[in-house]
Amino acid sequence: MNEKEKKVMSMYQETRPGAFVGEPSKVNHIAWSLLLIVIGLIFWAGLALTNAENQRYAIMTKQCQDRLFPAELNNACLTYVQSRPHWWQHVLYGLGHVAG
């Protein structure tokens, strides 16, 4: 290439699209993928902790006690019981009271 062609090419270099097929990317896809997986796992663990603590507290306060047999639990009640007003109360209690 001569000087004139280099000048023209350098002018249009900025208007070139970001990346073509087969060109190496400057984005670290592995790191972003791992970050999304970790965020998903944290979200899943929060949901599981909320559900487990909700059921544990309902059993402890006897909110799902069977009416006919007081020594038994009503298992259907455990699926829809709301033992505390908000989900974050379950998470805070579950994270603060870890039994080893």
Image: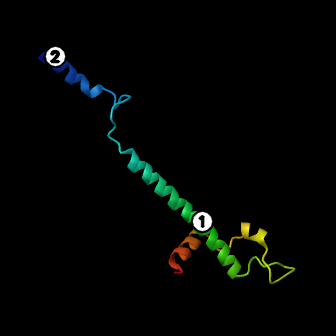
Tag 1, which secondary structure? helix
Q: Amino acid at mark 2?
A: Met
Q: Earlier in the sequence, mark 1 or mark 2?
A: 2
Q: Looking at this view, is 38 or 100 the one in front?
A: 100
Q: Quadrant of residue 83?
A: bottom right
| Residue 76 in the figure: left or right of residue 31 | right
Q: Residue furthest left?
A: 3
Mark 1, residue position: 48
Q: Residue furthest right?
A: 68
Residue 64: percent from left, percent from top: 76, 76
Q: Quadrant of residue 27?
A: top left
Q: Residue furthest bottom?
A: 71
Q: Amino acid at mark 1?
A: Ala
Q: Looking at this view, is 88 or 69 the one in front?
A: 69
Residue 48: percent from left, percent from top: 60, 65
Q: Which residue shows up at 54% across the image and 81% down it?
A: 99
**Relative vertical location of residue 72 with respect to residue 80 in this rendering, above or below:** below
In which quadrant of the rendered image does the N terminus lie? top left
**Relative vertical location of residue 80 with respect to residue 68 in this rendering, above or below:** above
Mark 2, residue position: 1
Q: Which residue shows up at 51% across the image and 74% down it?
A: 95
**Relative vertical location of residue 53 with respect to residue 69 in this rendering, above or below:** above
**Relative vertical location of residue 17 with respect to residue 5 in this rendering, above or below:** below
